Image: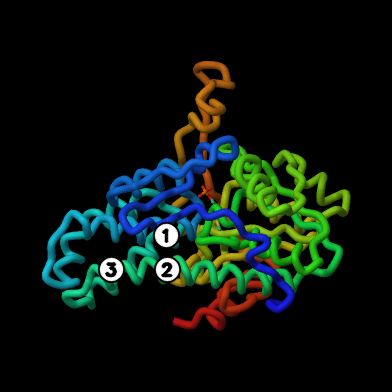
């Protein structure tokens, strides 16, 4: 299907720019009304940007962390990579602690740590090349997954997506949104719906804006409208991303994904998870073992800093949930499609 997709036509947004001196991050807290990049000059600034959701989305935070390690090297001197790795370890730990659920963060840091440990006197060049490779490989994986995932969708279909899994959440093109880009480009997807994704509104603030930049027609729905949408027959697939895919196929993703999977199964709508292999965590046996990030209840109690709930009310704000593998019809990575994922099909696709 690759030959039929004009990738560049449908992919204009870039959230991460390495300038050679600083890491420029498109500030996702300000979108869609301000398109502004903030400059990070050190690894702790990158860690704070990841924690504050200036940059967000599992692959994007892995890429940002890799560049954060490069920025961290500015503060140290070392004769070789092994010495540099020892000196950088505290900064890497702080980057790793910025968010717990998306495995891409730990994956990117492990990759940086490994190449650094093996590097000689040219270690500065080596890790800058590695950060660049993590970024360019992500874009290539997304484009390949886009073609693979779109191939599963019958012409004339409608799709529903959740959160933001697009260029904003990756090096570019996106995971689930990459499948949607490819499906629209190939004429397979006729209707795109995006859930608003309360409480941080990634769908409402980011996804429909991002699709608008690429002239892809999309309709926003309230999260609570999803089951009703499925009942009307307007969508044939729910297509979502992932923050961590376990060895048995259980998948952590933005809060609300699990209830979409339940509703999809009830209505005979298919459910697709799209993520690069850097999101697959074969060391975690099942979803019960994933740490679910809980964020400040203020995200629920206020909107853009303005309180919307009576004073004194308590809130609980888990920001991810786990979809059990038996509710997933297909997991798409750049390695291929795993249909009906379970411990056996995952082991075949991702051998040790
Ligand atoms: O809290 P966020 O906005 O970082 O959560 C993002 C998601 O849950 C995405 O679906 C996931 O990271 C995949 S992004 C390609």
Considering the numbered disc 3 on the image, is that residue within a helix, a strand or a loop? helix
How many discs mark residues in the rendered view?
Answer: 3
Mark 1 vs 3, N-terminal side? 1
Query: Along the horizontal axis of the image, is 232 left or right of 48?
Result: right
* Distance between the alpha carbons at the discs numbered 2 and 1: 8 Å
Residue at the image point whose x is 45% and y is 66% from the top: 135
- Foreground of the two, 76 or 267: 76
* Distance between the alpha carbons at the discs numbered 2 and 3: 13 Å
Marks 2 and 1 close (CB-CB < 8 Å): yes
Marks 1 and 3 close (CB-CB < 8 Å): no
The quadrant of the picture occupied by the N terminus is bottom right
Query: Along the horizontal axis of the image, is 192 left or right of 296?
Result: right
Task: Mark yes or no: residue 327 visible.
Answer: no
Q: Mark number for residue 134?
A: 2
The quadrant of the picture occupied by the C terminus is bottom left
Residue denoted by label 1 = 62
Residue 9 horizontal/vertical position (percent)? 67, 62
Residue denoted by label 3 = 113
């Amino acid at each position: 299907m690759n030959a039929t997709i004009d990738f560049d036509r449908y992919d204009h947004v870039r959230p991460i720019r390495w300038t050679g001196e600083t890491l420029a991050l498109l500030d996702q807290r300000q979108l869609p009304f301000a398109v502004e990049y903030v400059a990070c000059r050190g690894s702790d600034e990158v860690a704070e940007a990841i924690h504050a959701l200036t940059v967000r989305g599992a692959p994007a935070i892995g890429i940002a962390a890799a560049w954060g390690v490069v920025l961290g090297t500015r503060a140290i001197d070392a004769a070789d990579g092994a010495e540099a790795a020892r000196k950088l370890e505290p900064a890497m730990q702080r980057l790793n602690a910025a968010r717990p659920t998306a495995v891409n963060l730990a994956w990117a840091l492990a990759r940086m740590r490994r190449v650094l440990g093996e590097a000689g006197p040219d270690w500065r060049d080596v890790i800058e090349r590695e950060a660049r490779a993590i970024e360019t490989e992500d874009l290539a994986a997304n484009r390949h997954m886009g073609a693979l995932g779109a191939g599963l969708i019958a012409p004339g279909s409608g799709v529903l997506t959740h959160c933001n899994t697009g260029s904003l959440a990756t090096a570019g093109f996106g995971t689930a949104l990459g499948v949607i880009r490819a499906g629209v480009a190939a004429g397979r997807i006729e209707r795109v719906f995006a859930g608003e994704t309360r409480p941080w509104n990634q769908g409402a603030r980011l996804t429909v804006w991002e699709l608008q930049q690429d002239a892809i027609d999309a309709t926003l729905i309230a999260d609570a409208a999803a089951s009703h949408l499925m009942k009307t027959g307007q969508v044939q697939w729910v297509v979502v991303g992932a923050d961590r895919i376990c060895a048995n196929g259980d998948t952590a993703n933005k809060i609300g994904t699990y209830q979409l999977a339940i509703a999809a199964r009830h209505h005979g709508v298919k459910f697709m998870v799209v993520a690069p292999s850097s999101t697959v965590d074969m060391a975690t046996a099942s979803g019960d073992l994933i740490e679910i990030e809980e964020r400040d209840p203020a995200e629920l109690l206020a909107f853009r800093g303005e309180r919307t709930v009576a004073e004194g009310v308590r809130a609980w704000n888990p920001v991810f949930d786990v979809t059990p593998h038996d509710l997933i019809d297909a997991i798409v990575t750049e390695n291929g499609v795993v249909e009906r994922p379970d411990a056996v099909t995952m082991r075949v696709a991702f051998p040790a």
